[in-house]
Structure formats: C-alpha cells, structure tokens
Image: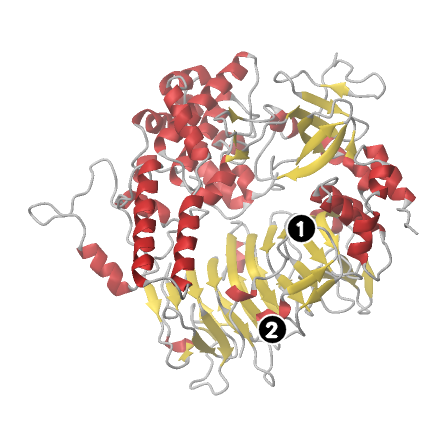
Amino acid sequence: MPERPPMELVDTLESLGLATAEQVARMERRVRRLAGDLPRFESVWVDALAQARLLTPFQAAELNAGRGRRLRVGDYVLCDRLPYPLYAEGYRARRVETREMSRLVVVESRQSDSVALPKGAVQFSSNENWDSLPLSTPGTDLSRHSSPLVCAEPWKDGRTAAEWMVQYGRFPGEVVLEIARAMAARLAEWERSGVCHGDICASSLLLTDSGEVDLPWPGLRGELRPEEGYAHLDLPPEAFETIAPERISSGTPPTPAADAFSCGCVWWHLLCGRPPLAGGDALSKLRSAEECRIRDVREYAPDAPPPLAAAIASCAWKDPRRRPESMARLSAMLGPPTRDGRERLIAALNRSGRPAVRLTTAARSIRRSKNAPIWLTAAACCAVLLAAIFWQFQNGRPNEQPPKQEIAANNLSVDGSRPLAPKTSQVEAHTTTERADANADGKAIVPTSYEQPEEPAAELVLSGDEPVRAATIRLRDGQRIRAPNGRRVVVLVPPSGMIVDRENVCFENIDFRPDPFPSQPDQSQNGLDRSTAKPVLRTAGEAALVRLLAGEAEFIGCRFQYESGLAGGAAIRWIHPRERETAAASLPSGRVAMTDCLLDGVESGIDCRTIGAIALRLTNVLHLGPGPLVLLDHYPWADEPVSLAISQSTLRDAGPLIECFVSDVDRAVGEISILAAACVFAPQGGMPLVRVHSVQPPRRIPNAMQWNGQGSLVAPRVSIFGWFGPDSRQMIVDESELSIAGLVRSEVVFSGPPSNDPSTSRLIRWQAPLQTADPPGIAPERLPRGK
C-alpha cells in the first residue's frame, strides 16, 4: 500500500509554490528506494524531491532544518544563497506571481531598523504594508516588509570577477580595459541620476557570458551602512578591500570620489590577481586602506594598457581632491567600450581547457593498452603535443616566459602581506639570479619605469635522514622551513616547544614531536625566554610543540603529535605581542594559517594568548583532540575581533571548536566571526562547539558571535554554546539566541575508529542534503599519516 507523504510537508510546499500534493505523492517509489528498511522520515521525502530537481539543495537544507517557512520572503521564494553581497544576505529568488527569477537582498530587522525611509515613499503592494525607497535603477525594488528590508533586481546569469579569478587567475590587460570602460560608462549614467554605488569590488562585479558588465544593487550599501571605520568590523575582510581612505578616517558616506578609488582598486586587482590593499582580517584591511600605499600597477602587470594604468594611478590617490572629479571624467580617460574589447571579454569568460584533457586521457588509454604497438603510442603523444601547441595559439599568445615583474606579482601572498617563498632551493634561486638578462657590459637590464623586485625570502631544506632538534634551527623573517621533496622531517622540540620569534615563517611537511631525551636543558623551562633574554614565569600546563612569539606564521602539511605515554600540551601556543603592557594601546593584529595538518594527542590546537585582532585560517585540518581546537585565554574585548575561517576540516572525538575564559561578564565584548565551510564537527559526547568559563552567565557573548556554516555538518546532540560556571556544571544556551546560518545537524559515519591515520576519519555516510556530492570534512590523501 503506498505510503502518504507528511501532510505538514505537503502544506509547506504548496504554500511556497514549490510542489503540489500530486508531485509529492509521485515520489513514493523514490522514497521507498532511498529509505530502505528505515521509516519514511520527512527528510527522506525532502531528499527525494531534491533528487527530482523539484527542490534546490538550499531549499532542501532549509526544509530539513525546520526553516521551510522562511523560504517565503514577501512576494518571493528563495532558491539559492549567493556569495554576494558581503554586507547582507543575497539570494537567487523567484517571484511567486510572475515566476520570474530575481536577485534578492534580505536584511534582517536588526540592521534594517536603522535605515530611515524618506518621507513620501510610495506604496509597493496593496495587500501588504510595504514601503519603497526611490528606485535607484530601473527594475530595482527596495522594499520593507514588517521586519526585513528587501531589495530585488532582475536575474542575470553570470559569475563575479572574484569567482573567475579563483579558477583562472588574473585577467589579461586588454580584457580589464574593456571591463573598466563598461564600468565607468555605467557609473557615469548612475551619477547623472544622483546615484553613488558605494560597493564596487571584485565580489560585486558581475560578468555574463555575453560580455555584459553589471554592478548589482547600486546605492544599497550606502543606505544600510552610511558609516564605515574601525567601529564597524562586522564584515569579512573582502568587504573592505576597496574602501576609500576618507571613509575610514572621517566616516563620510559614499561619494563619486570614493567610487573612483574603488574602481582603481578593482582594476588593480583584476590585472595583478590580488587586492592592492594588504591584510588578513577586517582591522588590518582598514589600516591598509587608511594608509593607502598602493604600488604602481605596472610593477606587477607590465601588460597593463597605458590608458588603464594612467586611470588607476589617478584613482589611487589618498587625497580625494586629486582623483577624477566625476565618473564622466574617468570614462573619458578610458574611452568608450568597443566591439573588439567585448569579443576579447567574451572569449576570456568562456575559456576552457577540456579538449587538452580529453586528448591526454585518450593518449594514456592507448599507452595502457597491451594491444597498442609502440609506434601508435608515440604517434598519439605527438598528436597530443601538437594539439596543445595549437590550442595555445588559438586561445591567445603562445606560452612565453613572463616578465620578472609578473613573477614578482605571482609570488605575492593572497592578502599581499609578504612575498611567498619560492619552491626551489637556495642553490637553484642563486643560479636563476645569475642567469638574469644582461647587456653587452654584463650588467642586468632593469626597466627605468619600475623598481627592482625584492629578493625572495630564504629557504631552509632540512635533512630527512634523521630527526632534527629544534635548538639547531636558526630562523629569519619570511623563511620557509621544509622537508626535501617527497619526504618528511621530524623536528624534536623541548617541553616548552620550539620558539618561533621571527615573522612570516612557513613550515612545510614537518612533524613536530616532543624530544624524549633532550640533549640540553630547556632554557624557556628554566625561566629564560631565548628570544628576549628576559626571565619568564612558567606554570603547570605550559607544554607546547611550537611557541609562537610572532604576529604571523603558516604551517603546511605539518603534524603535531604527542606520543602515547608522554604528557601532552598545546600544538601551537601563540603569545603575541611579547610586550603586552606597551602593546595594549596599539591594537596589534596577527594571523596563523594551517593547511593539510594533523593534530593528535594535544591539549589544545592553537592556544591564543594574544592582544588585538587575530585571524585563524584552517584548511583541511584533522583535529583528534582531546582538547579544544582553539583556546582563548580571555574572551575578546570590543577592540579585539577574532576571525576563524575553517574549511574542509574535521573535529572528531575532541574538545570544543572554541574554548575561552571570561573574567568580567559586564565588560563590552568583541565579535567572534566563524566561517565554517564543508566541515564536520563531531566532538566528544556532551561537549559543545563553543565553551565559555565564567563565574556568572555570559549574557552578552551569544549575541557577539556570528556563525556561517556553508554546508558544514554537526553531529546530533551536540550543542552550539555551553557555559561552565564555578561548580563545573554545564548550562546550554538556547540556539535561538545565536546568529547561526548554514550549519546542518546530521548523523555522521566515518570509515573507521579514531586514529592518527587520516583515512579512518573520512566521512562515508551522512543524512543531510548538501550542495555538492563530495563529502564534507577532510581530504585524507593530502594529510600526513601518523606513525
């Protein structure tokens, strides 16, 4: 007998216009196949509808989380979440009456209440109390329902410039010139209508396959956020990449001069492949913007067309009076859009390398065949080589050695804070320098219009034949410490850890382990800080594998492991700055990045004893505990924002994701921003994701935490926020008081029991629908194997 679908689900789908009762009933066979011997839960019906393309993955996730009614916003039904804008929630939505697709911005009541609607606003809808602001552009609706503020624009298929650069890198110079011309022409039209965009960045620059350049939602950010500066650090760092200096120092609203500065930064970004303003968090971005030290774009992109380079230079002045006085003037400097430029833009946006992949795959198949003669294999390889050369000429200029300035640009880090160390050894780097272009006199040729690129940071390749004691390693700023290619190096550290007191040091493929038989006394343990030669006080529980006394460090492919039978400690104990008394008023900032790392047997992953704004970037990290992944010695104060961006990582049978201690619950607290993408959180039983220790209940802290899940799974019966009082009893905070988006509760099944072999922590079964078929959590093949 066919089983009926849940009536509550059917009513919700019909009210949203997503599916009818008949369509849901026809899913019965698919539901039976999906559920097997299990009961036909409502989530199974939702999964069946998602497989039948009647629901989008985002809609299915919202329905499974019990937020199906929230998919209806006024006259619209939300279909997918958009990665932009960065200052509000963006969605792809469908209008219920006309079924037309729209690009939607929804601002919650807490932010929209501060937007003052002008007098004389016209009625938007006759059956609901909506008021609308004056339309900034044709076809744009800016409306307020009972609580949220809604802005809708007609939908255009395309992707942002930031998304394109993630896949293909920087844009060609002629293509950027065409984009700049189209942007300037559009902004000049809005300027004549009295509209200032206010949010021009690579994440808001939309490019369609037909070569159209669009900047959605002009004027909206200025209405929602008329002031920007150090008191408004509630956005990700990318939202401040193009902000004008005067908006930070004076708190002025968006102006045409500020838009001109943003245009120069965006075009610089498209040409060089990275933002012109350095910084890994919102605070450091604002400082870089206020200082406004932007280098000549031709140093990093010599192919920049002269008109574009001149326009960028005129827009990048710190003084707004020295920038173009209007968008019309800026458009005149660049010239009008051309047909040839648009064709180049279309060709760049529709580039693909699939033919080369298919030919290479065919050649490998012929080579593996036992019946294929050798001459046929050789002929196939020659054909592949000729096709690859022909493909390069068809899609642009042939492969050539890039200029030295371009090499310098490609060696810059993502946030522009320092040049990345090359992957060659010191001998190779020295040989390459000796082979530099020279004239007849033997002197190197340096273009007069550019400065000589800085020498890359030194690289230290450790011997992998036997373990290396940490005391024998001498560090320098910007140095890369790595193992030989294809091998790993064991570094034995004293009980207090290897002292890293140099800035921007990067460790690659290093196994940090405690030294069971130290060859010399531990100076730090004896009360002497080796980096400052000052006595320090040591207490119990000070053990660590790495003692970081610098503002920035990076760890790639490293393993932090305490052997069984040895007293555990922190993987990284981060003490920054060292002079805490004098640095309290300077608001320092710091950044620690971990990629493809394994943490096993540690009392804490990153023990932060810091002052100021800090940013933690964790990618493909497996944390097996038993302690927390991030430990804060105090909850950040109002001027100490904490940013945790964790992606493709797994927390299994460990402590909380974040644990901190609060001494004064009445003091103004800072914000902890957590961006968790494609992660799996399965801590020990009864352990929350965030644990706070304080004498009194922390009333302000739950409202100061911003959480965005983006496809991350949380095991059932795991609470989000827990408070531990003086009696060590845990109290769970109601999740409705927290700002949480994107986290999905689901049963998670791993491939094996917990061990230091990453393959046993691969996720093999989960119940929640996700946007992709790839399992969340770690990629074990990229992680070091334990011993």
* Image: 545 above or below 703: below
**Closest to the observer, 728 or 715:** 715
Horizontal placement of 768 versus 416: left or right?
A: right
> Nearer the observer, disc 1 or disc 2?
1
As helix, strand or loop, the secondary structure at mark 1 comes to strand
* Mark positioned earlier in the residue sequence (1 or 2): 2
The quarter of the displayed image where residue 665 is located: bottom right
- Find disc 2 in the rendering and name its residue: 602
The residue singled out by tag 1 in the image is 711
The picture places residue 300, in percent across and down from the top left corner, at: 33, 40
Lateral position of residue 384 relative to residue 780, left or right = left
- Locate residue 125, reporting x and y percent: 80, 18
Which label was assigned to residue 182?
A: none
Percent position of residue 531, x then y: 42, 68
Q: Residue at x 48, y 82 (%)?
A: 515
Q: Is there any visible trace of residue 398 in the rendered image? A: yes
User: Amino acid under label 2?
Assistant: Val
